[in-house]
Image (cartoon, rainbow, N blue to C red):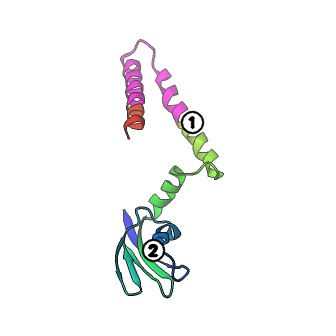
Amino acid sequence: MKHEKTIKVKLPPEIKPADIGPALRLRDFKILNTEGDLIFFQGGSYNTSTGEAEYLVKELTFPFNKLTVLHKTPSKNPLHWFTLVFGILLLFMAVSSLWMFTRKSKQFRKGILTVVAGFVFAVLLLLFL
């Protein structure tokens, strides 16, 4: 579902090797080796004399990257309110569908058990992951 994309960035020349990772905003940045003016790191390199950095990034393909942006919307983004209201409406629709059945029916009891099991599973995921 992912494809590789090459990114070329111009950084200030003679930057300290420890500052390359934060400047490129790369997590788990490690310098693998140094050969002359080139510093090699996981997935890329940095030229200390010219300041050019080149590295590979894996990105999701078209429809999935848009869904991921919606899923990971920060609270400062106006889309945050859309995703919040949509989630609340989905929760309401899921819970209100249980009242299509009478309380004494077998389907209602199975629905309540499914809701409780889903809630317990979600709490366990939040606690242990």
| Residue 86 is a magenta residue | no
Residue drawn at (61%, 48%) of the image: 75
The three-letter code of the residue at mark 1 reads: Ile
* Image: 38 above or below 113: below
Q: Measured from the top left, where is residue 16 in percent x and y?
A: 49, 75
The three-letter code of the residue at mark 2 reads: Pro
Mark 2: which secondary structure? Answer: helix
Q: Measured from the top left, where is residue 71 in percent x and y?
A: 51, 50
Residue drawn at (52%, 33%) of the image: 91
Residue density around tag 2, few if under 14, some if 14–19, many if 20 or more, within 10 Å: few
| Side of 64 relative to 88 (left or right) | left
Mark 1: which secondary structure? Answer: helix
Q: Quarter of the image containing the N terminus?
A: bottom left
Q: Quarter of the image containing the C terminus?
A: top left
The residue lying toward the viewer, choosing from 124 and 118, is 124
Q: CA distance from mark 2 to mark 1?
A: 47 Å
Find residue 102 and report its image quarter. top left
* Image: 53 above or below 86: below
Residue drawn at (47%, 24%) of the image: 98
Please report the bounds of the magenta region as a residue range: 91-120
N-terminal of the pair, mark 2 or mark 1, is 2
Task: Examine the residues drawn in magenta and state their main secondary structure.
Answer: helix
| Side of 10 relative to 56 (left or right) | right
- Label number found at residue 17: 2
The residue lying toward the viewer, choosing from 81 and 54, is 54
Find residue 81 and report its image quarter. top right
Which residue is situated farthest in the top direction here? 104
What residue sits right under mark 1 in the picture? 88
Q: Measured from the top left, where is residue 99 in percent x and y?
A: 49, 21
